[in-house]
Amino acid sequence: MPRVKKLDLGMTALDELFMNDKERAENKLPKIFDIPLSEIDDFPGHPYCVLDDEDMQNLMESIRDRGVITPAMVRKKDDGRYEMISGHRRKHASERLGLETLRCEVVEVSRDEAIILMVDSNAQRSEILPCDKGRAYKMKLDAIKRLPGRLSKENADPVGPNLSGTRSNEELAEEVGDSTTQIKRYIRLTYLVPELQEFVDKGQMKMRPAVELSYLDEETQRDIVDRIDETEAFPSHDQAIRIRKAYEAGEIDYDKVKDIMAEEKPNQKPKFKFSFDRLKPYIPKDYSDSKAEDYVIKALEFYQKYLKKQREQAR
């Protein structure tokens, strides 16, 4: 059976932007309309955050100066309204600027094809938050497995094989440049409570411990959130593994979480380093390394006793 056809993103070339409706019809191109913003709905479950950050300010300035250069992509719904596929940031910027319409390219695609287009078009962004990426990967894999020509049993497995024998997640890995293992890790982030997802997106919690915590139920995850809030410390990968094992063994509660997270992490242990060149003048030349170490320890013990005696005499 053939592989799933890769959908064309439909990104409009510059020469297409200036075609009239007759020319576009002759070339079988989607028509471009100025659609009222009030008639465009955001894509349901849109996985990417639209932030009012510096990039948004730059986009607003660009639209204010030159207008929307690349039309947004929408599809018409059964109720006559439009559904945004690609262009949520352009829509938000236009709304903030007080504009009434948005230049859009209307495409005729199914909901699942729209999901794939939406994810693929946003994959070109320079920065995507880890949890946004996880939601996007999950949506696309779910959409791919529902496309015609897929095995029905695939519905039970988001990374199951298709009819050509190639796994859906392997296809996605080829397209996005992440390994199948990394794709699975990103998707696991979607099972975290919002507070933990925020820690990951802000870079406060690493990916691998977060993945381990994603297997916990909501109550246990919130116990971890409470502990993080109390201590401002995040579980290491090793601690997260042990918390997960305790949870799966039915031995987890808040006290157990507290005990595991209270343990000193290897990277928190103080490390003292001394240059041997600084110590060498005080150690007999014929001493081996182990004997030299004992010599230094005894010297410190002697000095400690000396300081104690000095303090007692000063009383």
Image (cartoon, grey):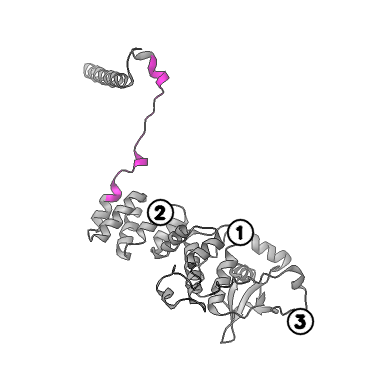
Which residue is drawn at the image coordinates 56% and 87% (left, top)?
79
> Which residue is at the front of the view, 54 or 208?
208
Q: Position of residue 201 (x, y in %)?
A: 47, 57
**SS assignment at label 1:** helix
Q: Position of residue 163 (x, y in %)?
A: 49, 73
Q: Are marks 3 and 2 in contact (CB under 8 Å)?
A: no
Which residue is drawn at the image coordinates 27% and 61% (left, top)?
248
Q: Position of residue 140 (x, y in %)?
A: 51, 70
- For the residues labelled 1 and 2, the Cα–Cα distance comes to 29 Å
The quadrant in which the C terminus is found is: top left
Residue 307 location, quadrant: top left
Residue 60 visible to an observer of this rendering: yes
Please tell me how crowded label 2 is: few (under 14), some (14-19), or many (20+) other residues with Cα within 10 Å.
Answer: some
Q: Earlier in the sequence, mark 1 or mark 2?
A: 1
> Which residue is at the front of the view, 29 or 87?
29
Which residue is drawn at the image coordinates 41% and 76% (left, top)?
153
Q: Are marks 1 and 2 in contact (CB under 8 Å)?
A: no
Q: Amino acid at mark 1?
A: Asp
Q: Which residues are magenta?
A: 260-280
Q: Nearer the viewer, mark 1 or mark 2?
A: 2
Q: Amino acid at mark 2?
A: Arg
Which residue position is annotated with label 3? 26
In the image, taking residue 223 as reference, residue 170 lies left or right, namely: right
Q: Position of residue 240 (x, y in %)?
A: 33, 53
Q: Earlier in the sequence, mark 3 or mark 1?
A: 3
- For the residues labelled 3 and 2, the Cα–Cα distance comes to 53 Å
Q: Nearer the viewer, mark 3 or mark 1?
A: 3
> Which residue is at the front of the view, 249 or 88?
249
Please tell me how crowded label 1 is: few (under 14), some (14-19), or many (20+) other residues with Cα within 10 Å.
Answer: few
Which residue position is annotated with label 2? 208
Which residue position is annotated with label 1? 55
